Image (cartoon, rainbow, N blue to C red):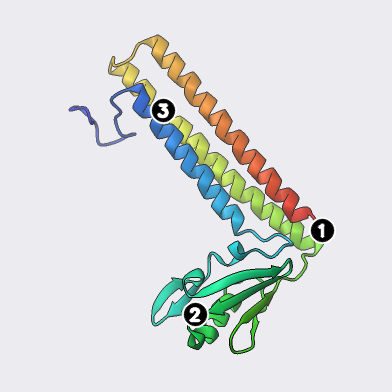
Amino acid sequence: MKSAQSTPSGPAPFANLKEVETSVKTRMDKALQDLLHAMSTIRTGRASIALLDSIRVDYYGTPTPLNQLANLHVPEPSLITVQPWDVSQIGPIEKAIRSADLGLNPSNDGKVIRIPIPPLTQERRKEIVKHLHHVAEDHRVAIRNIRRDGNEAVKKLLKDKKITEDEDRRAHDEIQKLTDQFMQKLDQAAKAKEKEILEI
């Protein structure tokens, strides 16, 4: 529901505090889910089919996610196997894995592609952790931006006399509480991932 005098610039107008808080929570949750997805594609010392999530294969001219063209398995901690449903695609799939810049070296026997996951050097682990910190920081910034948008929307409700000053204060506290909760979840997830990367 938009108010009649909504301005085209600035955050979308909200009718009440509930809408603001729901929007803040939904957006923060989305940022957290996005972080978890981004982290699932970061390499650890163990084989994981999530490593191949970003790979697209040229399937008759259409870039297609690998998991839509093949069965992916982790038969042992340092090996991923890819079994294409259409054996004629084994070449393009292998090529896509090779050119994905994941440092993987696939080989095939005509039916199955085997991807050995080389153990990570200490140096490489440190680089990956650094990358993880960047990814986590980007998502922290996103959460802080969502907090700012929420606070601005609350201020606008106060300015438009839709809420009292008490409600304004309470809403700011609530948004800060949500921010703290999501920051904590984000930090815990990043720490757990870092531990996984550094485990030998």
SS at mark 1 in the image: loop
Amino acid on which the number 3 mark rests in the picture = Glu
Residue in the image at 66% along x and 74% along y: 104
- Quarter of the image containing the N terminus? top left
- Residue 51 image position (x, y, % from top left): 61, 64
Query: Is residue 87 placed above or below 103 in the rendered structure?
Result: below
Between the residue at mark 3 and the residue at mark 2, the CA separation in whole angstroms equals 46 Å
Location of residue 7 (image quadrant): top left
Question: Tag 3, which secondary structure?
Answer: helix
The residue that mark 2 highlights is 85
Q: Which residue is mark 1?
A: 200
Image quadrant of residue 171? Answer: top left
Task: Choose the circle earlier in sequence order: 1 or 2.
Answer: 2
Q: Residue at x 52, y 35 (%)?
A: 144
Nearest-to-viewer mark from 1 and 2: 2
Label 3 with label 2: CB-CB less than 8 Å: no
165 shown above or below 175: above
Residue 28 in the figure: left or right of residue 98: left
Q: Nearer the viewer, mark 3 or mark 2?
A: 2
Q: Position of residue 98 (x, y in %)?
A: 60, 78
- Residue 101 percent location from the top left of the image: 61, 71
Q: Which mark is residue 8?
A: none
- As shown in the figure, which amino acid type bears the numbered disc 2? Trp
Point out the tag, 3 or 1, that comes first from the N-terminus: 3
In the image, is residue 140 above or below residue 106? above
Q: Residue furthest left?
A: 4
Q: What separation in Å lies between label 3 and label 1 (alpha carbons)?
A: 43 Å
User: Which residue is the site of mark 3?
Assistant: 21
Question: Could you say whether the residue bearing mark 2 is in a helix, strand or loop?
Answer: loop
Q: Nearer the viewer, residue 56 or 144?
A: 56
Q: Amino acid at mark 1?
A: Ile
Quick one: 192 or 165, which is closer to the camera?
A: 192
